[in-house]
Image: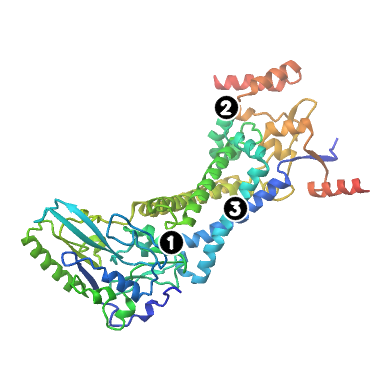
Amino acid sequence: MGNLYHAPDVVNDVAVNQDFAMLYDSSYCMGCKACQVACKQTNMLPAPMKDEEYEFNLGGYTYPPENSGDNYLRMVFTEVDNPNGPKPFDWIIRRESCNHCTRAGCVEACPTGACHYVGNGSVDIDPHLCIGCKFCSTGCPWSVPKYRERDNINAKCWFCQDRLSQDEEPACVKTCFPDALDWGYRSTMLTKAQKRVEQLKSEGYEDACIYGEHEMEGLHLLQVLKYKPEVYGLNPNPSIPLMKTIGEAMTPVALAGVLGTLAFVSMSYKNNKNYKKPKLHYDPKTDETYTQDGEIWFKDEFKRKHSIEPGDEHKEQKLVEKGSDQTVVKTQDKSDEEVK
Amino acid sequence: MPRQTVNWIERHSSQTRFWHFANMVFVFILAITGLFLFTPLGHYLPTEVMLWGKIIHRAAGAFFIANWLLWIIRKPSDFAHTLKNIFKPWDENDKNFMKYFFPYMLNADKYHMPRQTFVKSGQRVSDFSMYFVLFMFAVTGVVLWIGPTRGIPQWLFDFFKMGHDICFMGWCILMVFHIYLGAGIFPVYGKQASAWMFGSGYVSETDGLYHWGQWAEEELASGENVLEVEEGLTPSQQLKKNEMKKVS
């Protein structure tokens, strides 16, 4: 059974309305993956137990190959040659989970309101409201929310709101023994991160930085990086995906289009309200269409106005041959004069 | 001599009308459910409704695609004929019809449109746009259904989500025109226009000659699809009467 109990109403008043953040210091991380295990355990997320279910990720220490609805957190390991630092080679680690944006694309994309700001800096997906449309992953710059088929919902890291409500820190933080993870007020975490960055710079990591201070108007997962974000495979300037932005920008255009069309047809309706359509009938003997007044229904008016009635050369010829219709010929002459 | 009977020409077969009706039902369901699924309007609905909305949206989408596939498989010649009509080269009449169609819509009294064949050039533009949008709807919709977890790359999913949104926007505009003209809200076409697709499928001689002059003249000359309807009767009543006569 899936973990469906993390509704936002379990969050107590202490946690709500306080801007909390998680600090991940990659320079302290030793890659033990205890955080991944703790996350799985706390959130009761199943792991593959059979060989055929296991998805191998050959050639790397990162596992699983991708996060999923049953895996909210993974550590990504990368070997880097000649990074801009004191070492000629480094084995760098970054945390891949929800960044809990201040301006969250998933919240903007969600059609049901399942993705929501909890109020303490976290962004959560309410499983009771989620319909599994997957649009949240479209709105997220990192495509973090993942579909969980067995529950038909999208799921992601939720900063263990159930633990927060019990004045406990998130499970991954609790289990991290090298203290690479920390939890607290965002301002406190930011100060701590800034100090650490200064220290790293003094140790020769010239590109040391904080990832998440300003990105997406401020993330609630702050990462201390030894090198530039690009080295870790992180987008230095994350934004709401262009395709979602285009889709949204089209909304007013489309609305204007629909309103314009409605205005046009309204005008058309008003102008033609009293239109009287002529009664027509076809006479197979003369191969001609007549109005109720017995006049030939020909495209004279159109011809006069625009001096064109393509295809009628053939018809005129036919009529002249029949010698049956002077009206048409006269009308043609008239129209020619008018054109001149 | 007053005419005792009025000629009506068969415009759409019962199969076509049924097919169109099925399309209309599916599209209506898709539009309503889609409106809530793809916009924040869904925030105001209970989750159960949204969940059922998603299921119904997908089911209607599947039936809609099946309806088209059935048509293509059962009547490939009809489908080929439709495509041929859409992509038929335009003659001067067609070009002029399209050129003056919008001014004509605004003031029909001032314009006298060129004679048209079975499908007017304006209809061809509309049909092409609708078929194209519907095709894109189907393709993007299937990708959205499969989702990024089952082998569809995330970027493709995102791209098709945007495509689905854009299709809906284009569809809304097309539908305003289609309903205005097709349902005969446009006073020049009149209420009887809706009967061509939703009623008997027959068009009166007057309407046929007015709208599709060339086609109607050909039909009336051949007499093949022409029904002589006694004055005061509708084509459906006349057909029933003819049936009764045959039986008796």
Q: From the viewer's side, name the closer residue of A120 and B220.
A: A120
Q: From the viewer's side, name the closer residue of B176 and A121.
A: A121
Residue A186: give x, y in percent of width and height: 21, 72
What is the secondary structure assignment of the residue under circle 2?
helix
Q: Amino acid at mark 2?
A: Glu
Mark nearest the camera among 1 and 3 is 1
Q: Please tell me if label 1 and label 3 are on a single chain.
A: no
Q: CA distance from mark 3 to mark 2?
A: 36 Å
Mark nearest the camera among 2 and 1 is 1
- In the rendered structure, find residue B92 and report the number of the disc placed on it: 2
Q: Is residue A252 shown above or below A286? A: below
Residue B107: give x, y in percent of width and height: 57, 40
**Do callouts 3 and 2 mark residues in contact (Cβ within 8 Å)?**
no
Read off the residue under disc 3: B64
Mark nearest the camera among 3 and 2 is 3
Q: CA distance from mark 2 to mark 1?
A: 66 Å
Q: CA distance from mark 1 to mark 3?
A: 37 Å
- What color scheme is it? rainbow
Chain letter of the residue carrying label 3: B
What is the secondary structure assignment of the residue under circle 3?
helix
Q: Amino acid at mark 3?
A: Phe
Q: Locate the C terminus of chain A by quadrant.
A: top right
User: Quick one: label 2, few (<14), some, or many (20+) residues within 10 Å?
Assistant: few
Identify the residue at horizontal 36%, vertical 65% (top origin): A107
- In the rendered structure, find residue A52 and report the number of the disc placed on it: 1
Identify the residue at horizontal 42%, vertical 58% (top origin): B149
Residue A132 makes an appearance in the image: yes
